[in-house]
Image: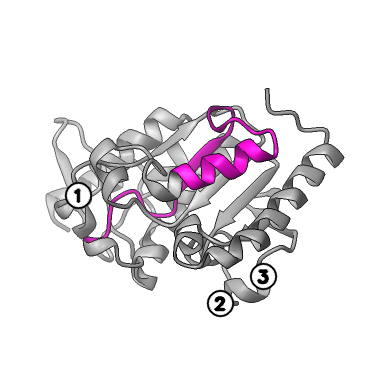
Amino acid sequence: MNETLKWFKSVGVERFINDKYFATVKDNSTVKYSENIICNDPLSNITTLEDLREYIISIDHPLKKAATNTVFGTGNTLSKVVFVGEAPGHDEDIEGIPFVGQSGQLLTNIMHAIGIEREKIYITNVVPWRPENNRTPSAEEIKFFKPILEKHLALLNPEIIITLGATATKAVLDTTAGILSLRGKWIAKRIDGKQYQVLPTYHPSYLLRLSSQKKTVWKDFLLLQSKMEELRISIN
């Protein structure tokens, strides 16, 4: 056994995983865990959103190399309603904030129409870095970031999750079903011991391309409004 593995064993590492993670060792240098290296899940030791942000920033992932900023999340961290999108676009990559471009403005307007001020809820994405040319994140990328997204949601501890588009819906619900069959339906989903009420709807960018679907999304947001009243969730 080499010195690195001896050190892992000395600090209580007991099992193998197949994902790539980072950890800070005794000399404060960063060690890259490659596939099948013995390591503990670093997410289990994260207890705050700030720690999760720093952990994400430390990850060495191909998407990060082409990105300008890490886009973590924004809004009220105590909100019982969380919106999950797909990935940052060009404007989000520049500003480091989710949903600040045209799609974000449309989302803000729809929220406002049912009495929700954007800064009173929380918004994040499945993937924290912009994929090249605004492409859809790959299945491999979604799988890689899924445990991080679940940790993010666990730390936020909302009651309602609105998934915006197919990518976010598949990641949160762990499903292969399409957005066409899922949107507009409340789905109870248990993640890490906590049950959430999940409502899939279309991504705002889809509405920019197909404005006729705005009426459909409006119906979904009325469902959100009714559910908030049912659960006595106020956004103020």
Q: Please, what secondary structure does the residue beneath circle 2 have?
A: loop
Q: Disc 3 or 1, which lies upstream in sequence?
A: 1
Decide which of 132, 33 is in the foreground and name it.
132
Determine which residue is flagged by label 3.
182
Q: Where, by quadrant of the figure, is residue 50 drawn?
A: top left
**Mark 2 burial class by Cα count in 10 Å: few <14, some 14-19, many 20+:** few
Q: Please, what secondary structure does the residue beneath circle 1 have?
A: loop
Observer able to see residue 158: no
Q: Position of residue 94 (x, y in %)?
A: 23, 41
Q: Residue at x 75, y 49 (%)?
A: 222
Q: Residue at x 54, y 67 (%)?
A: 170
Q: Disc 1 or 2, which lies upstream in sequence?
A: 1
Mark 1: which amino acid? Ala
Determine which residue is flagged by label 1.
67
**Label pair 1/2, CB-CB below 8 angstroms:** no
Query: Is residue 12 left or right of 153 when viewed as pictured?
Result: left
Q: Range of the magenta residues? A: 105-132
Question: In this view, which residue lies farthest toward the top?
Answer: 236
Using the numbered discs, state the Cα–Cα distance from disc 3 to disc 2 in whole angstroms.
10 Å
- 1 or 2: mark nearer the eye: 1
Q: Is residue 187 above or below residue 177?
A: above
Q: Disc 3 or 2, which lies upstream in sequence?
A: 2
